């Protein structure tokens, strides 16, 4: 790894990616353990979607920390910047999305298309456009809606840098962006064009216009660190304080009555405010602690194995829910049936290793992590390096073989 990369790389924050992905995993499958927890306990675990907010704040921090002092709003710089973002995000998303639609054509599982034209849905998923439509946001790889939000941030970040440097208008930006989102809802909620910005809840929770504040909190943290450095005099353990406050936000959301037609307290007005505005600040405190402290938690997150899990967590996030998990679940059911057929043949009254749903979920968790690591090592990482070194979008000059954006003027 080059010296420039080392200066912009934080192992503990890579480990945080794994934590975020696993929190989302719990939020989707907590019901498997439902009978073991009280109602408030179930709703508490159901709010572990905070992993998505962790991703958003982290993206805001990393993009700003790496690019803010080196960006030049020129055609070549912007092309190189987009090239690096495409190399990081798009290849695995495209491959797994195609896999999801092949799964649909093989099984007819309409959770992929929601009953809409599969070719239109494939096109809208591949281009991230589905994330702007309430009717389509959870088609294809359902959790991939968050990538539409991420891509909107990636595209707009350089312009936000420009406005910050030229006009010093930082916190005004998210207010204007969300205000524009509200205006779109006022206009298009009357049109009913497949739910394009069809309601305020959708806009606030599933689009960049509603969730931009989370990225700006990460950006503010990066600007603070760029200005102040990583050395501080206070002894407050911000990592532990931030972590405690994060789960306090989870508890606040768990206490809310879900809005009509929505499953969790997140979708209530207080839930939206907590998730979009209070939680990001708590996450920023957590990150600041990891950046400036030496704690056991930081050592765990920076551990080489946890770091590997963090690097492969993007794939884990994309496959933990949907067609690949459905295949695993189907195989577990077949294996369970086969085990009991054997027991009947042998005249044995034994337990099947696949008859317990919580155990099967643990199997799936481990297998999905193994698949994620393999795909990361054999597909994602090589494609990332290949695209960065290719002439895609901008020719890769020999004097800059690693396509470092700081060298693109």
Image: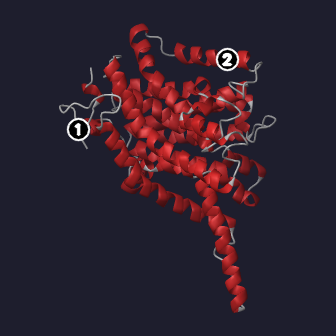
Looking at the image, the residue that sits furthest to the left is 399
- Mark positioned earlier in the residue sequence (1 or 2): 1
Residue 280 placement, left or right of 91 = right
Residue located at (59% from left, 23% from top): 209
Point out residue 66 in the picture as x, y percentages from the top left corner. 35, 30
* Residue 294 picture quarter: top left
Q: Give the vertical position of 98 relative to 34 (above or below).
A: above
Point out residue 290 in the picture as x, y percentages from the top left corner. 42, 40
* Residue 277 picture quarter: top right
Q: Nearer the viewer, residue 396 or 325?
A: 396
Q: Which residue is mark 1?
A: 3
Residue 65 placement, left or right of 125 = left
Label 1 to label 2: alpha-carbon separation: 45 Å
- How does the figure colour the protein chain or chains? secondary structure
Q: Residues within 10 Å of mark 1 (few under 14, many from 20)?
A: few
Q: Quadrant of the C terminus?
A: top left
């Amino acid at each position: 790894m080059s010296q420039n990369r080392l200066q912009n790389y934080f192992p503990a924050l890579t480990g945080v990616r794994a934590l975020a992905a696993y929190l989302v995993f719990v939020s989707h499958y907590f019901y498997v353990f439902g009978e073991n927890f009280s109602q408030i306990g179930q709703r508490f675990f159901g709010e572990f979607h905070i992993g998505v907010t962790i991703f958003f704040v982290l993206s805001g921090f990393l993009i700003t920390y790496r690019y803010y002092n080196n960006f030049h709003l020129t055609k070549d710089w912007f092309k190189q910047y987009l090239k690096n973002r495409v190399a990081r995000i798009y290849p695995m998303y495209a491959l797994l999305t195609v896999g999801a639609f092949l799964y649909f054509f093989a099984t007819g599982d309409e959770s992929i298309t929601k009953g809409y034209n599969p070719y239109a849905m494939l096109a809208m998923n591949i281009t991230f456009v589905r994330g702007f439509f309430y009717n389509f946001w959870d088609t294809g790889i359902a959790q991939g809606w968050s990538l539409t939000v991420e891509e909107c941030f990636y595209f707009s970040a350089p312009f936000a840098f420009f406005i910050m440097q030229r006009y010093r208008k930082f916190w005004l930006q998210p207010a204007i962006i969300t205000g524009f989102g509200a205006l779109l809802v006022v206009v298009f909620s009357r049109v009913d064009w497949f739910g394009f910005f069809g309601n305020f809840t959708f806009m606030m929770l599933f689009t960049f216009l509603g969730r931009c504040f989370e990225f700006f909190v990460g950006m503010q943290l990066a600007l603070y660190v760029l200005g102040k450095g990583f050395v501080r005099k206070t002894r407050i353990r911000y990592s532990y304080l931030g972590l405690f406050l994060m789960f306090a936000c989870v508890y606040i959301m768990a206490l809310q009555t879900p809005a009509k037609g929505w499953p969790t307290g997140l979708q209530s007005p207080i839930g939206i405010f907590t998730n979009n505005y209070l939680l990001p600040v708590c996450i920023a405190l957590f990150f600041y602690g990891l950046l400036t402290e030496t704690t056991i938690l930081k050592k765990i997150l920076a551990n080489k194995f946890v770091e590997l899990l963090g690097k492969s967590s993007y794939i884990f996030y994309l496959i933990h829910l949907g067609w690949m998990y459905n295949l695993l679940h189907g195989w577990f059911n077949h294996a369970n049936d086969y085990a009991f057929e054997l027991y009947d043949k042998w005249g044995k009254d034994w337990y099947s290793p696949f008859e317990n749903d919580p155990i099967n979920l643990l199997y799936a968790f481990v297998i999905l992590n193994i698949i994620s690591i393999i795909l990361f090592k054999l597909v994602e990482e090589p494609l990332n390096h290949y695209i960065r070194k290719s002439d895609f979008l901008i020719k890769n000059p020999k004097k800059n073989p690693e396509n470092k954006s700081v060298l693109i003027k």
